[in-house]
Image: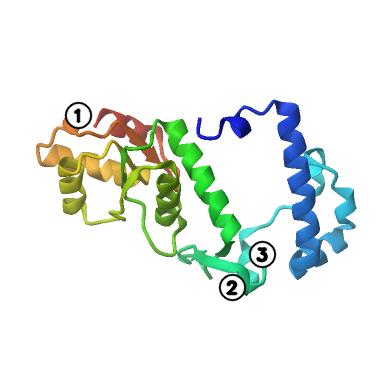
């Protein structure tokens, strides 16, 4: 565990923390984001109606089209002078969805990723081969921040450049790697094609995400 105090909270105490944060969030959204004020008013929801996580069922879903219709910044709950990083989706099926992070948001992001890394087997002092894309996509920089907070040495390879990826995996000897499942499959295929025994790589743990992956891909990656 990375943060034992938080990660071992008894369920009842955890629900109290979650309920307090949810109440604060709903109040902030209602006051600061016109989209949510209008939506809640139309549905007859007032912030005081949400007393905790047991009231989650009262809240409407936010759909991707809602984010697109409020592109780029109308969904932000904080003023722009408080924003320290902006990320966005690829926009391949329409306007990209945009996310803004305050300094506190980034600290939470780093903490969450550090916890996830520890849960997956990573430890301070290990090297992370980060093959998530750096840029508007959240993956590369998000994982980078969490690994740095944990105390790992980050190798910011980013995506693509498979020749270079394989050279670094062999020569830099990272114990942990992260990328999408499909790219892990690509690397596995390339290792086989080039006669590289992936079992001899230093990688002990792989954190794969950012897209769905099938059982077939999982089996191939685990065996490759």
Give whichever of 185, 204 is nearer the camera: 204
How many numbered callouts?
3
The mark nearer the N terminus, 3 or 1, is 3
The mark nearer the N terminus, 2 or 1, is 2
Q: How crowded is mark 2: few (under 14 residues within 10 Å), some or many (20 or more)?
A: some
Mark 1 residue element: helix
**Which residue is depicted at the point 44% across and 60% down?**
137
Q: Name the residue under label 2.
A: 72
Give whichever of 142, 197 is nearer the camera: 142
Whether residue 98 is situated above or below residue 169 in the rendered picture: below
Image color mode: rainbow
Q: Name the residue under label 1.
A: 199
The Cα atoms of the two marked residues, 3 and 1, are separated by: 46 Å
The Cα atoms of the two marked residues, 3 and 2, are separated by: 11 Å
10 on left or right of 166: right
Q: Identify the image quadrant of the C terminus.
A: top left
- The location of residue 107, given as percent across then percent down, is 55, 52
The Cα atoms of the two marked residues, 2 and 1, are separated by: 45 Å
Mark 3 or mark 1, whichever is nearer to me: 1
Mark 3 or mark 2, whichever is nearer to me: 2
Give whichever of 212, 142 is nearer the camera: 142
Q: Name the residue under label 3.
A: 66
The mark nearer the N terminus, 3 or 2, is 3
Marks 3 and 2 close (CB-CB < 8 Å): no
221 on left or right of 198: right
Mark 2 residue element: loop
- The location of residue 119, given as percent across then percent down, is 47, 31
Q: Quadrant of residue 126?
A: top left
Q: Quadrant of residue 33?
A: bottom right
């Amino acid at each position: 565990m990375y943060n034992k105090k938080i990660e071992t909270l008894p369920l009842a105490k955890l629900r109290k923390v979650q309920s307090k944060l949810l109440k604060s969030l709903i109040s902030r959204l209602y006051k600061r984001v016109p989209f949510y004020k209008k939506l809640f008013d139309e549905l007859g929801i007032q912030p005081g109606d949400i007393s905790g996580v047991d009231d989650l069922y009262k809240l409407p879903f936010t759909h991707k089209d809602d984010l697109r219709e409020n592109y780029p910044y109308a969904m932000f709950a904080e003023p722009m002078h408080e924003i320290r990083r902006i990320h966005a989706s690829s926009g391949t099926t329409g306007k990209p969805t945009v996310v803004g992070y305050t300094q506190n948001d980034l600290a939470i992001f780093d903490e969450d990723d550090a916890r996830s890394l520890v849960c997956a087997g990573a430890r301070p002092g290990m090297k992370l081969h980060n093959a998530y894309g750096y840029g508007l996509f959240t993956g590369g920089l998000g994982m980078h921040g969490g690994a740095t907070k944990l105390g790992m040495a980050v190798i910011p390879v980013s995506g693509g450049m498979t020749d270079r990826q394989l050279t670094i995996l062999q020569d830099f000897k990272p114990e942990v790697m992260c990328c999408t499942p499909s790219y892990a499959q690509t690397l596995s295929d390339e290792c086989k094609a080039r006669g590289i025994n992936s079992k001899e790589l230093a990688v002990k743990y792989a954190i794969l995400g950012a897209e769905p992956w099938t059982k077939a891909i999982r089996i191939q990656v685990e065996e490759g």
